[in-house]
């Protein structure tokens, strides 16, 4: 199982996807990172989430608002960091996600 699959499993797997409307999953950074898009109902306009496994075996959570603008005929993405939570343990992933986005990961 890859690190990204493990992170998704620790978030709740398919239950997490169904409850939050998460989509567009991607991995990068040597597969130590998973990024995805929550549904459009996340608070603070959060529309991109990154979770990175750190060398200390904890996670860093990045919550962003990304907008696309056309400037001089070119598309440009603007990233606004809404929140950054560091040193999160695997058993805290769901609660941090809910606190930051307002989306529940289970019923």
Image (spheres, helix red, strand yellow):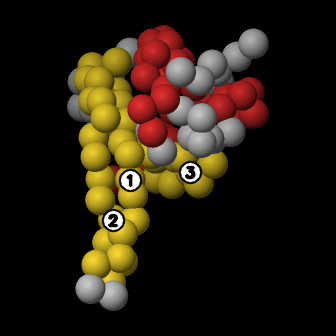
Label 2, label 1: how far apart the Cα atoms are: 7 Å
Q: Which residue is drawn at 26% across and 23% down?
A: 86
Of tags 3 and 2, which is closer to the observer?
2
Pick the residue in front: 83 or 9: 83
Residue 66, disc: 1
Q: Which residue is drawn at 27% across and 40% down?
A: 81
Q: Do the residues labelled 1 and 3 touch (CB within 8 Å)?
A: no
Q: Position of residue 93 (x, y in %)?
A: 47, 20
42 vs 90: above or below: below
**Residue 89 appears in which quarter of the rendering?**
top left
Label 1: which secondary element? strand
Q: Do the residues labelled 2 and 1 touch (CB within 8 Å)?
A: yes
37 vs 97: above or below: below
Which residue is under mark 3? 25
Label 3, label 2: how far apart the Cα atoms are: 18 Å
Which residue is under mark 2? 77
């Amino acid at each position: 199982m890859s690190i990204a699959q493990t992170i998704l499993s620790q978030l709740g797997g398919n239950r997490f996807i169904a409850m939050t409307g998460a989509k567009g999953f991607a991995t990068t950074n040597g597969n130590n990172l998973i990024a995805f898009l929550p549904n459009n109902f996340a608070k603070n306009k959060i529309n991109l989430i990154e979770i990175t496994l750190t060398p200390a075996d904890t996670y860093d959570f990045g919550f962003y608002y990304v907008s696309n603008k056309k400037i001089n005929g070119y598309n440009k993405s603007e990233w606004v960091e809404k929140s950054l939570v560091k040193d999160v343990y695997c058993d805290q992933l769901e609660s941090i996600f809910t606190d930051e986005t307002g989306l529940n990961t289970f019923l």
